[in-house]
Amino acid sequence: MQLLKTTGEMLKDKSFLSKAITIALPVALQGMLNTIVNLVDTMMIGTLGETTIAAVGLANKVFFVFSLLVFGVASGSGVLAAQYWGNRDVKNIRKVLGLALIISVTGAMGFLIPAVVCPEAVMRIFTTSEGAVLVGITYLVIVAFSYPFTAITNTYVALLRSVGRVKAPVVISCMTICVNICFNYTFIFGHFGAPAMGAPGAALATLIARIVECLAILAVTYYTRSPLACHVKELFGYSRAFLRQFASTTGPVIANEFMWGLGTTMYSLAYGRMGDNAVAAITIATTIQDIVVVLFQGLSAATAVVLGHELGGGKIRRAEKYATNFFILQFMASLFAMAVCFSIRGVIIGMYSITPEVAADVNLCLLVFILYLPAKSFNFVNIVGVLRSGGDTKVCLFIDTSGVWLIGVPMAFLGGLYFKQPIYVVYAMVMFEEVYKMVIGYGRYRQKRWLRNLNVELCRAKQNL
């Protein structure tokens, strides 16, 4: 009865629903658009065979780990920016932007250099298949140059989101998708006078699209005179108290995403040793799953921003109430997403040029994903949204990394290499980490230690120096 009453109150709270939808839908749509690009990429590359699908999928694991590092920087910075925006502290928001750009672009170069200098060594981390290594190298050495542009774009998008500017990134994503798909068609298959490049053509299309996207984000930021539009000198000049708060809030998030990314990359290492068919199946299944997951990425982003604004404005009780509302929305959305994923899986699988054996494995991997979705969606909203909104990032680091390294990674190697189970069984073993994280994360949420005003803490820290 209490749950029904709370749900009814939430649905009548127009102010809350407006804030949640205004942020969640554009973020989810943007994620959906990016996922569609990946889906189209995979489908176009899929016409070249399972080995090419596996090669590009494994080469993109480098980008996956890099993107998680950037996401950690952007997510942690977004927590501070959202709370500062709740207090309309534009000066410190710009300093957050400057520091985030330094870290993310430096990280991009750390991934770009080895990918270009020794691509074969990088590819052999993920697979022993000579065919996949050779194809993956041709893709990796080109796509790696897109990393710095991606770092800049994602940092600006995250902080624009924190100050309530969410529409422009969606429009730019639409434009980027058109650019990417057009150049994919041109360079992969050799249309409009261009050579048929195959996998390297897909990489070139991605590079061009990321450059266009980055320039467009910067242009919109300054043309609309957003709070992030500033002189270069405003991005620097950090007090000791500011650096401490940035490090204590953002540092664990960066470590969280990076360690989680390394852990999930270990899954790929195990999958890569199960054969090209297993890699192709999990690559396709993951691409389809991403269509569903973006919904919860949007919801978790809205959770972090809305709660951050409330906490930064000193409205602690309202933040706690809104957190409950977001969990209700998460549960409702998970039921919807499970139904959608179950309904569309056959249609999308049929679009790929793959063998019946691979198609059957993809289908079973998707059924495993559907079963674990309620736990996975709760973790998105709780860890990325609720707990991080109040700067409880060290606990988030523990929950995520322990789930991956103590459960997920051992399960991947035990199931795939020791017990030699099919890919869908190994995937089910790996996904059990979501149940563990849900139990631990819910306990932390109930302790209410995430209900913190970081603006007040920064002022106190300055006074004590």
Image: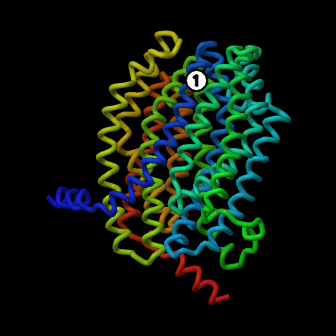
Work out which quarter of the rendered image holds the C terminus and state it: bottom right
Quadrant of residue 20 within the rendered picture: bottom left
Q: Is residue 91 above or below residue 106?
A: below
- Counting from the top left corner in percent of width and height, residue 55 is at 67, 23
Q: Residue at point 35% right, 43% down?
A: 374
Q: Residue at x 81, y 39 (%)?
A: 114
Return the residue nearer the eye: 217 or 457. Answer: 217
Answer with the quarter of the image where residue 54 lies. top right
Given residues 306 and 323, the one toward you in this image is: 306
Q: Secondary structure at mark 1?
A: helix
- Residue pushed farthest left? 1
**What percent of the width, then of the height, locates residue 276?**
61, 18
Q: On the image, numbered disc 1 is attached to which residue?
A: 42
Q: Residues within 10 Å of mark 1 (few under 14, many from 20)?
A: many
- Of the residues shown, which amino acid type is indicated by label 1? Thr
Horizontal side of residue 243 vs 432, given as left or right: right
> Which quadrant is home to the N terminus?
bottom left
